[in-house]
Amino acid sequence: MKNKIRIGNDEIFYFFNCKRLLYYSLNSENGEFQTENALEPDRINMIRDFFKGEFFFDAGYNSEKTLELLSRKKSVLRPALVYETKETTVNIKPQALYWDGNEYMICIAHFSRNKNKRHAAISSIAYAALREMSVEVSRRIYYIQRKRLTKNKVDEYFSKNIINDILRVKNGEIPEPEGRRLCNVCEYWDECNATQPDKAYLSLSTIRGIGSNMLEFFSEKGINTIEDLLKTPVNEELRQEIKSIDRLKMQAYAFSKDVAVFINGSTEIIPEPKGEPCYLDIEAENYPYLFGFFENEEYNPIFFENETKLNENSMEIFKYLSSKQFTVYHYCEYETKVLNSLAKKIKFSLRNTNFVDVYMKLKQNVVLPLRHYSLKNVAKWLGFSWRVNLDGRSSIMEFKRWVKTGNDSHLKMILKYNEDDCRATKIVGDWLMNPQLFNRKLEILDRNEVEGIIQGNIKI
Ligand code: SF4
């Protein structure tokens, strides 16, 4: 018998964020891939704060424990509701089920200003699951955003529709790529980027920088695909309407041809380092707690276990920086902001250290065939892989876990992740200095050639 497919919170998340990821996840032979849901503990805390004074039993996402608590009519935190349909095993996890004395209220906590379709889908499936289990459940759903409660009637038909839609994705053609930030932690990144459908016919939503308002604007002008955009000459009126139109056209060009385009006529973007090259990446939560330096194939982390230690010992960072003549490479402006602010506090001068923002150099000079220019995406595109599958948010969660438990395994994960961020910055910097040494297609265009593309004078 064919294996049933599992539908849970992750699948619903993928459905609304990247159907291609959902497709890969449902059809993968290696079992399911789960994203680290870094915010879930905060959503659970939101429920705890909201219902202060009420007692909830924690089911820990265990379906049997959930059933047992439901049979005793107890309020349940972190329930797991499981039921079967012909083709699926549904395992849905609302944040809580509140017993109000007569019936259960499904509770969904959210950070977004308003509830969205994903929240509505989870509540609808949770409602269907509870009905399936013959549990007395209210049609009113509690949507909780910090101290605010909104009660909405459940859309009973949504659960069936969404499950059918998910099955259609599983059995259909491979969908267009949609993810952006999600690509940073996506297990299927290589597979996704190796899949090269004829990109000219892809929707404009696959282009970096085009959001829903812009899509609507283009659609009104009959511009729906990458090919439509590439063919459209840019006139002053279009430039007035969309300030970034030149960049978008170059982005569409690079993406459709799968080529990195150097737009200023040269690959000489980053000058040779003055002194030793060093790669810096900072991890931060409420304060910057980890300064990772990677120099001469050696990783040197400076870690501060709390903010007081940072304030008392920040000189350690500057001692390291002044131990040699360094050129420090970093990705985005955060690193220099932090260092300047710390240096100011202790009246240290950074005048002798040369800093290069690799991201800024990249953004000003190159257009990549990618939909997101995060360090993760760019370095992965160049063949780099991280040893731990964390991202900014989940590394913060690891740090919080370390603070709470003192368990060094969390700290080790963060250090590995930070070291790999430094190494990734080096890879991107190396590519910018010598792109010919990497196995990636590139074009070096002068101003006239760029203008030709912007005006639509290209063969597609
Ligand atoms: S890499 Fe990004 S676009 Fe591709 S499947 Fe993953 S999330 Fe979707």
Image (cartoon, rainbow, N blue to C red):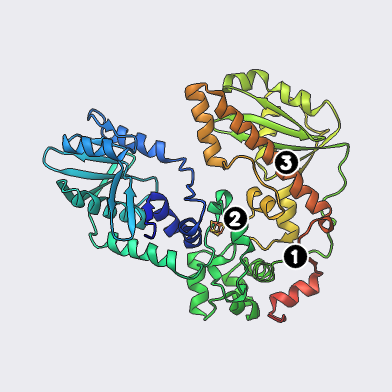
CA distance for labels 2 and 1: 21 Å
Image location (x, y in percent) of residue 140: 19, 51
What residue sits 59% from the left and 55% below the top?
189
Q: Is residue 179 visible?
A: yes
Check contact, mark 2 vs mark 1: CB within 8 A.
Answer: no
Regarding residue 152, the answer to whether it shows in the image is no
Q: CA distance from mark 1 to mark 3?
A: 24 Å
Q: Amino acid at mark 1?
A: Val
**Which disc, if any, is residue 189?**
2
Marks 3 and 2 close (CB-CB < 8 Å): no
Which structural element holds mark 2? helix
Specify the label residue 423 is tagged with.
3
x, y percentage for residue 332? 67, 45
Residue 114 percent across, percent down from the top left: 35, 52
Q: Is mark 3 within 8 Å of ligand 1?
A: no
Kindly report the distance in space between the C-alpha atoms of the residues bearing marks 3 and 2.
19 Å
**Residue receiving disc 1:** 261
Q: In the picture provided, is 388 more to the left or to the right than 129? A: right
Q: Residue at x 71, y 52 (%)?
A: 383
> Which residue is at 31% across, 55% downward?
120
Label 1, residues with CA under 10 Å away: few <14, some 14-19, many ≥20: many
- Residue 178 x %, y %: 52, 62
Q: Looking at the image, is mark 1 or mark 3 earlier in the sequence?
A: 1
Q: Secondary structure at mark 3?
A: helix
Q: Residues within 10 Å of mark 3 (few under 14, many from 20)?
A: many
